[in-house]
Amino acid sequence: MRKLFFDTRRLDAAVREKYGLSEELMMENAAARLEESLSKIDRRGKLLVLCGGGNNGADGYALARRVYMKFAEVVCVECAPAKSELCVLQKKRAASCGVKILRLDSLHQFIEKNSSEIYAVVDAVFGAGFHGSLPEEIAEAVSEVNGLNAFRVACDVPSGLDSLGNAGGVVFSARTTVAMGALKVSLFSDCAKDFTGEITDADLGVSRGLFENSMEQAENILLLEKEDFVPPLREKQNVHKGSFGHVCLVAGEKPGASVIASSASLRFGAGLVTLVDFSGRLSSGAKLSLNEDGFPSSGFVPYEIMCGSEFPAVVSALGFGMGLGSGERMKKCFDWISENPSVPVVMDADVFHEPSLRAVLEERCSKKSPTVLTPHPKEFASLLEICGFGKYSVKSVVEKRISLLKKFCEEFPNVSVILKGASVLIAGNYGGRIEIFCNPWGCSALSKAGSGDVLAGLAVSLLAQGYSPLEAAKNASLAHAFASRKISPDYSLTPFSLIKAL
């Protein structure tokens, strides 16, 4: 796992003081990492570097100096007058080497004459401290270079993204973003995912571990990496199906959702799965129609999923809400978990519109009952309103998701939340410590009906196999994301192809 920071300027200062590094030395290391990001670019073309007036711009001028004569031509565009001491110095050094420096109002003419020869563009205009929207002239310049058929690199953070990763207008669209020193929260927002490209980090004179731990981090926000995934692999051999838990899922108005979740639960390691339908309509294999991959093609119940009209006598973990509807079915679920507080529960979809949900969560929090919630932003907005946090639009939830998750977790400890999105956030408050984890590995293939039902099924399966709520939430989300990347072409994902990819 990697630490994420809202603003690394104080961290930079702490590193300089603790390890005796000068700001100029760190800047040279930053420029060297930017140079590395351009190592595979055809050097017969021209390099265009957009420079701001602060130290981000200074990084750009330092890069231009380092690669001068390594490209057909290196051109810096002064998007703002050099203001910081180092920016003034680095600009002077670049110019003395022969780097061409253009005024911003000359950029359009330069691009018109040289567009086919510009092979790479580096954005060094604004860094991590940016807020608001780009000034009009800079926004126009960024829009124009975004339209070039060139390899685009962002220095630290693509210009136009604020400290939360939100955009007030135009944003530089990078193929690669080189984060300086440590990773920023802003690089992993839902909005940022369309602008950062591949994210790499640059050490600025000390190792990543030393850099990240040079001062106490207040945020407690961690980036999940591939190595953090702990799948439910079976190490013991002297076992039976009961060794891996009995998952119970509840069917409702739209039973296909619970069928999908049931299939995902069994696929992800649960020993037994029972689908409860209080109406008694469903039975295993009823009207079963299998496709060529061996999965139900019409949403009917596979033979291996047990069906019943009542909760089983033994339940290792329960999942409900997906396609459930409201009314009597929801009440039965709420009553059952109140009578069985020790049973881990995953709540999804329709649950987040129930007015009585706040009381249910308060009871489970007070009893430390294992609970995982899996809302998307619209459902989270409804959950916040029901729980007394006020009304939020979906846009506000997406833009303020970290602070809203913190508020929710403060009020409802011992509950893990998977807040779905382009970059998924997983949060929980255990022992008075709120932790937020970011899963950036998903892709747009998951924007399909039924993919959320798969996620709920994965989470309840892990709960049944003994994972803690927070570990179940993290690993279910990671498995969901990794599986989505195996679907090709990406538009062709279906819930059952996603389950197969597990």
Image (cartoon, rainbow, N blue to C red):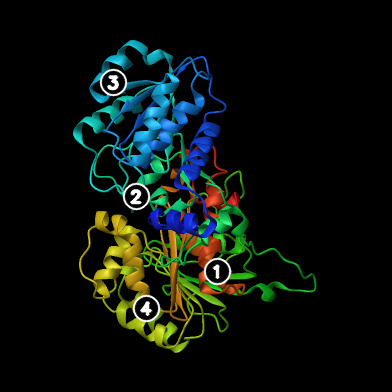
Residue 336 percent coordinates (x, y)? 43, 84
Closer to viewer: mark 2 or mark 3: 3
Callout 2–callout 3 Cβ contact below 8 Å: no
Which amino acid, by three-letter code, is at mark 3? Leu
Seen in the picture, residue 462 relative to 93 is either above or below; the reply is below
Callout 4–callout 3 Cβ contact below 8 Å: no
**Pointer 4: residues within 10 angstroms few (<14), some, or many (20+)?**
many
Which amino acid, by three-letter code, is at mark 2? Gly
Residue 412 numbered tag: 4
Q: Which residue is mark 3?
A: 107
Element under disc 1: helix
Closer to viewer: mark 4 or mark 2: 2
Seen in the picture, residue 208 relative to 196 is either above or below; the reply is below
Regarding residue 291, the answer to whether it shows in the image is: yes
Residue 338 lies in what quarter of the image?
bottom left
What residue lies at 33% left-to-right and 54% top-to-bottom? 164
What residue lies at 44% left-to-right and 53% top-to-bottom? 12
Q: Which residue is mark 2?
A: 165
Which of marks 2 and 1 precedes in the sequence? 2
Task: Report how far apart the C-alphas of labels 4 and 2 lie in the structure.
Answer: 26 Å
Residue 240 percent coordinates (x, y)? 73, 73
